[in-house]
């Protein structure tokens, strides 16, 4: 149901930011209908919010600005997409052996659903994902060392890299701040991108989890080329046209 079009510009923009915070991405057509305004008005609102650094306009809508965020901030957004991705990704988690997991909130949802492990070791650079893994039956959780980056709540740096590189993994499960068909996956900090590259180099298989709000965008630091990813899992139907640009590079689920 559309909200009254009598909203003034400030009220509309506050509502747009609330929508973006909840979903991670908004489309022009949906937001205009929801707020009861024209798409031209909505585009002006988005342009003003982008100028203030509060969102990034992309084709057809807008996404959250690509800046470092804490685990709690990331967890508060896109819950439905995370659940959809996790349901698809559960089968890539082995029952035994070693599995590397990054510090993403999407991976945290995935780990919370693991129920088939027999003798699985999960290695992660996130204390939140460590806690999600350690309570699962049949799982031993390992947290890499290093220093905690307060902007992202992830453990990074030389010590984290040294420990991550000292193990071999059957699979590395990662998310991304942004995903572009030419640029690959990228992160908001160079340190986070670096630890993901190390996990990838020491894994037999790399699985990338990316909700649709991440598609078609680039963050500060490149992490993985698409050719380095074995499987891309999104919240979209694999036949969705938004995934066409990725099909020649990676298997999609």
Image: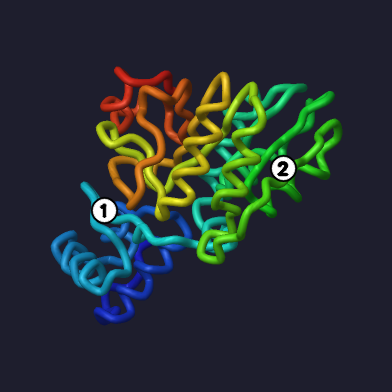
Residue 245 versus residue 78 in the image, above or below: above
Q: Which mark is residue 112?
A: 2
Q: Position of residue 141 (x, y in %)?
A: 77, 40
State how the image is colored. Answer: rainbow
Q: Name the residue nearer the viewer: 150 or 93.
A: 150
Foreground residue among 112 and 13: 112
Label 2: state its secondary structure: helix
Across and down, in percent, residue 36 comes to 27, 66
Helix, strand or loop for disc 1: strand
Instruction: Answer with left or right where residue 22 lies relative to residue 96.
Output: left
The picture places residue 55, in percent across and down from the top left corner, at 31, 63
Are circles 1 and 2 on residues that touch, CB within 8 Å? no
Residue farthest left in this picture: 40
Q: Position of residue 66 (x, y in %)?
A: 36, 57
Observer able to see residue 253? no
How far, Cα to Cα, is label 1 from label 2? 31 Å
Name the foreground residue: 157 vs 170.
Answer: 157
Instruction: Name which of mark 1 and mark 2 comes first in the sequence.
Output: 1
**Could you say which is closer to the camera, residue 28 or residue 162?**
162
Task: Please report the residue visible at 34 percent of the width from the left and 28 percent of the height from the top.
Answer: 240
Residue plotted at (31% across, 26% down):
246
The residue that label 1 is drawn on is 61
């Amino acid at each position: 149901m559309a909200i009254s079009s009598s909203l003034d510009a400030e009220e509309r923009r506050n509502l747009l930011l609330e929508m973006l915070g909840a979903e991670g991405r908004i489309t022009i057509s949906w937001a205009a209908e929801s707020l009861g305004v024209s798409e031209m008005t909505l585009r002006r609102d988005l342009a003003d919010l982008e100028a203030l650094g509060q969102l990034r306009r992309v084709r057809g809508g807008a996404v959250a600005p690509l800046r470092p965020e804490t685990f709690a901030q990331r967890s508060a957004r896109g819950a439905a997409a995370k659940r959809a991705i996790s349901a698809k990704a559960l089968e890539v988690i082995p029952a035994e052996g070693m599995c590397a997991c990054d510090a993403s909130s999407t991976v945290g949802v995935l780990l919370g659903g693991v129920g088939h492990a027999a003798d699985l070791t999960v290695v992660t650079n996130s204390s939140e994902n460590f806690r999600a893994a350690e309570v699962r039956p049949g799982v031993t959780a390992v947290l890499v060392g290093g220093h905690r980056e307060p902007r992202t709540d992830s453990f990074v740096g030389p010590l984290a890299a040294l420990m991550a590189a000292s193990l071999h993994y059957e699979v590395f499960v990662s998310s991304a701040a942004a995903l572009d068909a030419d640029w690959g996956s990228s992160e908001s900090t160079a340190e986070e991108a670096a630890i993901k590259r190390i996990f990838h180099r020491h894994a037999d298989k790399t699985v990338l989890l990316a909700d649709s709000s991440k598609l078609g965008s680039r963050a500060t630091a490149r992490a993985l080329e698409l050719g380095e990813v074995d499987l891309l899992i999104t919240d979209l139907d694999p036949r969705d046209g938004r995934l066409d640009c990725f099909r020649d590079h990676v298997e999609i689920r």
